[in-house]
Amino acid sequence: MTESFHLTVADARRRVPTPRGKPYLELLRHGSMNVEFFAPAGVDTQTPHAQDELYVVVSGRGEFVNGALRHPFGPGDVMFVPAGVEHRFENFSDDFAVWVIFYGPRGGEKPAA
């Protein structure tokens, strides 16, 4: 049996950036799932990831570039990025922060038929 786990935004904000200055921190791992808190300052320098991922916007506003698409985002929005797709947050406010959920196999899950 897996233990339940409770994550709070307040706790995550206290831990990011990390002592080494990273704008993200892994907070939970279970099977293929990994939950992180991501709060970059000024510029998002991330590169494509090996797993599918979901972003849940905690706070802030800006623009999300997802492959060839660009769209505005705000608190409560959810964005999906397939594994290997170029993506980043741009023109975001100083209070910007997201939960990031990575899951599935390397290379991403196969779309439903």
Image (cartoon, rainbow, N blue to C red):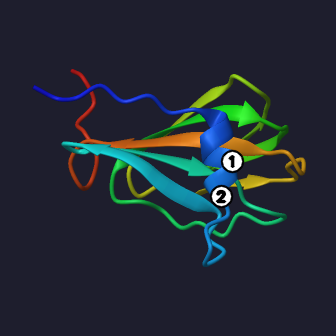
Q: Amino acid at mark 2?
A: Val
Q: Nearer the viewer, residue 49 or 57?
A: 57
Q: Position of residue 65 (x, y in %)?
A: 69, 49
Q: Residue furthest bottom?
A: 20
Residue picked out by circle 1: 13
Mark 1 secondary-structure assignment? helix
User: Residue placed at 23% from the left, 36% from the top?
Assistant: 110
x, y percent for residue 91: 88, 53
Bin the neighbour count of mark 2 within 10 Å (Cα to Cα): few under 14, some 14-19, many 20 and up: some
Residue, far left? 1
Q: Are marks 1 and 2 in contact (CB under 8 Å)?
A: yes
Q: Is residue 67 left or right of residue 101?
A: right
Who's the residue at 26% across and 54% down the image? 107
Q: Using the rendered image of the protein, determine whether residue 67 is visible from the camera's viewpoint.
A: no
- Mark 1: which amino acid? Arg
Query: Looking at the picture, does residue 67 appear above or below residue 17?
Result: above
Q: Is residue 86 above or below residue 27?
A: below
Q: Quadrant of the C terminus?
A: top left
- What residue is rendered at 48% in x and 62% in y? 48
Residue with the mark numbered 2: 16
Q: Residues within 10 Å of mark 1 (few under 14, many from 20)?
A: some
Q: Is 19 drawn above or below residue 113 in the view shown?
A: below
